[in-house]
């Protein structure tokens, strides 16, 4: 029994309102609890913990007083093993729960036609998680096994889909899974907004050529070869007076549209972005010069730069200075500064397209909320079922 312990009741009230006003918990968990009579209440307790102190599972019975669990509808504080059993059950029924969540959204007309798709990853502590795989780490932990997850959330901030893949699955491959999940709730003409990581011809055809036609809006990958040609087109059209200039959030943009079959390319230029990128690359260049200054001094003094061991002995590295007639140009400046392009199956005014793409930060904020607010870095559950539950609730 916890004595003289206070606890926040606001999140309990919130969960009760969701249950009473919308019947959400009954809709999702009413038929999957099996013989566990307090299954829904344990799920609510897990969510309450996530919304409140977000302590590890084995600490939940110790941190919250008995009164908190009474408010959540439980007669006594659940044992640690009860929480773990519930987590495993939710993970085991993950696909069913997600489908019921989507049915709930459709039933209550909560699915927005504008859906923002994004991907991220999180890593595990330890080396034994079955779901984990080594891959590109967004968290700066390349040596840790991880999972990738994809989400889709509406412009109304209501998430509609969640997919989980191993940590070595790239966004362009993962997109197929999240698209199949979110398409279950989308109506004809809905638009999916995503960044260049999932921008492939295959994915765009999948969106456009299914039984139900959807639209897409995505960022064109910034490759020098392809961007050089569209920048040249932009400059030609601007010279003809065909560039549209507009202001958004205190920044000015110019845009030229380039139509290709059933796709429209929106080529943007921002003076503010141009200056910011120039300054960033100048700082990067100066940092490189400073880093290499030690080697320059060694070469001027005739000292060796280092050595490499081989089967025949050591190779001694020496350097020489190659003078240039003109000042050395910054190698990080590539001529693409200030430009970016969006590709879409929708032909609209540039300001509408840009505004919609900028709203993609709703997905980014949702992911930050998952990873930071719910402390998903790292995941400490090793079993696949527990890992899925950790992301869902």
Image (spheres, rainbow, N blue to C red):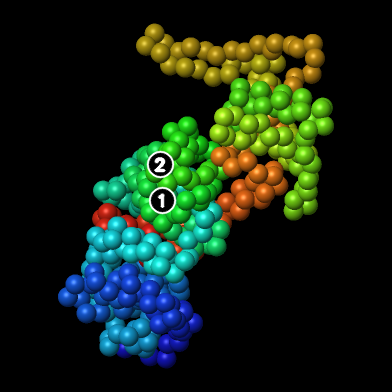
Q: Are marks 2 and 1 in contact (CB under 8 Å)?
A: yes
Helix, strand or loop at disc 1?
A: loop
Q: Residue furthest left?
A: 35
Asked if 67 appears above or below 229 in the picture, the reply is: below
Question: Which residue is at 40% across, 13% downward?
Answer: 310
Asked if 134 appears above or below 324 in the picture, the reply is: below
197 relative to 287 in the view: left or right:
left
Quarter of the image for the N terminus: give it: bottom left
The mark lying in front, picked from 2 and 1, is: 2
Q: What residue sits right under mark 2 in the picture?
A: 210
Q: How many marks?
A: 2
Q: Position of residue 62 (x, y in %)?
A: 34, 78
Question: Which residue is at 28% across, 61% downward?
Answer: 96
Asked if 31 appears above or below 191 in the picture, the reply is: below
169 relative to 191 in the view: left or right:
left
Quarter of the image for the C terminus: give it: bottom left
Q: Position of residue 221 (x, y in %)?
A: 57, 33
Question: Which residue is at 43% across, 81% downward?
Answer: 21
Query: Disc 2 or 1, which lies upstream in sequence?
Result: 1
Mark 1 crowdedness (10 Å alpha carbons): few <14, some 14-19, many ≥20: some
Helix, strand or loop at disc 2?
A: loop
Front residue of 139/99: it is 99
Question: Which residue is at 74% across, 11% downward?
Answer: 323
Asked if 330 appears above or below 199 in the picture, the reply is: above
245 relative to 37 in the view: left or right:
right
Q: What residue sits right under mark 1 in the picture?
A: 183
Front residue of 10/145: it is 10
């Amino acid at each position: 029994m916890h004595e003289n312990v206070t606890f926040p009741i606001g999140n309990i009230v919130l969960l009760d309102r969701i249950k009473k006003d919308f019947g959400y918990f009954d809709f999702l968990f009413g038929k999957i609890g099996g013989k566990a009579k307090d299954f829904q209440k344990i799920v609510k307790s897990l969510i309450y913990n996530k919304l409140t102190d977000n302590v590890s599972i084995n600490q939940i019975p110790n941190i919250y007083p008995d009164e908190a669990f009474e408010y959540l509808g439980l007669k006594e504080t659940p044992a640690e093993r009860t929480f773990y059993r519930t987590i495993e059950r939710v993970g085991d029924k993950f696909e069913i729960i997600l489908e019921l969540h989507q049915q709930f959204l459709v039933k209550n007309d909560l699915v927005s036609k504008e859906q923002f798709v994004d991907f991220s990853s999180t890593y595990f502590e330890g080396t034994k998680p079955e779901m984990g795989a080594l891959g590109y780490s967004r968290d700066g932990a390349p040596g840790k096994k991880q999972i990738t997850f994809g989400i889709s959330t509406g412009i109304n901030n209501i998430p509609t889909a969640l997919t989980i893949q191993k940590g070595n699955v790239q966004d362009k491959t993962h997109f197929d899974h999240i698209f199949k999940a979110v398409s279950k709730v989308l109506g004809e003409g809905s638009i999916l907004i995503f960044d260049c990581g999932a921008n492939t011809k295959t994915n765009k055809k999948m969106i456009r050529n299914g039984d139900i036609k959807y639209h897409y809006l995505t960022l064109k990958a910034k490759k020098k070869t392809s961007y050089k040609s569209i920048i040249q087109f932009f400059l030609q059209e601007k010279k003809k007076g065909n560039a549209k200039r507009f202001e958004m959030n205190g920044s000015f943009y110019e845009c030229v549209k380039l139509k290709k079959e059933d796709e429209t390319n929106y080529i943007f230029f921002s003076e503010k972005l141009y200056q910011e990128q120039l300054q960033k690359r100048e700082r990067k260049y100066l940092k490189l010069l400073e880093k290499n200054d030690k080697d320059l001094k060694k070469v001027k003094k005739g000292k060796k730069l280092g050595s490499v061991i081989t089967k025949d002995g050591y190779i001694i590295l020496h350097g020489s200075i190659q003078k240039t007639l003109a000042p050395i140009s910054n190698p990080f400046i590539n001529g693409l500064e200030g430009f970016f392009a969006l590709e879409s199956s929708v032909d609209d005014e540039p300001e509408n397209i840009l505004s919609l793409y900028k709203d993609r930060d709703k997905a980014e904020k949702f992911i930050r909320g998952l990873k930071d607010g719910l402390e998903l870095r790292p995941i400490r559950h090793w079993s696949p079922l527990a890992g899925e539950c950790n992301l869902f609730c």
